[in-house]
Image (cartoon, rainbow, N blue to C red):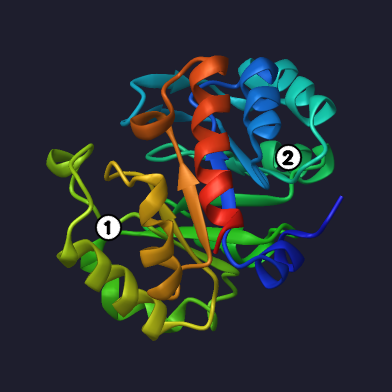
Amino acid sequence: MPDIADIFTQNNMTLIVSLPGNDPALAGAAVAGGADVLKAHIHLKHQASGTGFGSLEEERQALRSILEAVDVPVGLVIGAAETADETEMDEVESMGFAYIDAYAHHLPAWMAARSTLPRMVAVEERYMDLIPQLENLGMDMVEAAVVPHQEYGLPLNLYDLGIYRYICDLTDLPVIVPTQKAIRPDEVVMLRDAGVSALMIGAIVAGTTPESIEKAARDYRRLINEL
């Protein structure tokens, strides 16, 4: 299985699917549609999909099923207001995940210091001054989660593109854009031109069923392959 860093280096644009549920059927559909990377979750209420995710104990079997079902790297959001504790992280690191992900204000300092997995850190627009320091703090990828909740699902606009470009100018780390906005497949070229390394599609554009996820992944994959 390719290393997550190698994927970003080799691809013009990487396609990540954020799973709306820890379900191997959803994971398989995403890969069938052309996803390069997947993302699962624990300890979280997912705003876009309205889905809740339990502790590692509650999600363990589903997560193991996902890891066994696909041959692409799978990352794990380790929580929000509540995150995985040190015992859970010991197990997460042994399960075969390719990276961990959390918002900067949710990622415990001890985890940033000790995790052996690559770290994706999500930033809101208020954290622009932090972005140039993320590499020095040991982060590996930046998730540009900068859209306010009240704007979720709206069309991509010029301001959004400008913010994404600005973030890419602030760091040498790969920048991942999640579909908080309803980014269209034909807009991936604009993200690529702004310097974005990966598009992470989720429930807003991909829905929550295996059929809708596979179709969405296939639509974005086709346009990414044309870059």
Residue 176 sits above or below residue 137 on the image: above
Q: Which residue is depicted at the point 43% across and 29% down? A: 206
Q: Amino acid at mark 2?
A: Val
Query: Within 10 Å of the Cα at label 1, are there few (<14), some (14-19), or many (20+) other Cα atoms?
Result: many
- Outermost residue on the front side: it is 226
**Position of 19 compared to 23: left or right?**
left
- Callout 2 secondary element: helix
Pointer 1 residue: 146
Q: List the single residue furthest toward the left.
A: 150
Q: Quadrant of residue 80?
A: top left
Name the spot of residue 158 as percent of width and height, x first. 17, 65
The answer to whether 200 is drawn above or below residue 167 in the figure is above
Quadrant position of residue 40:
top right
Question: Label 1 sits on what residue type?
Answer: Val
For the question of whether residue 3 can be seen, the reply is yes
Q: Is residue 137 left or right of residue 93?
A: left
- According to the picture, the residue beneath numbered tag 2 turns out to be 92
Q: Is residue 214 above or below residue 80?
A: above
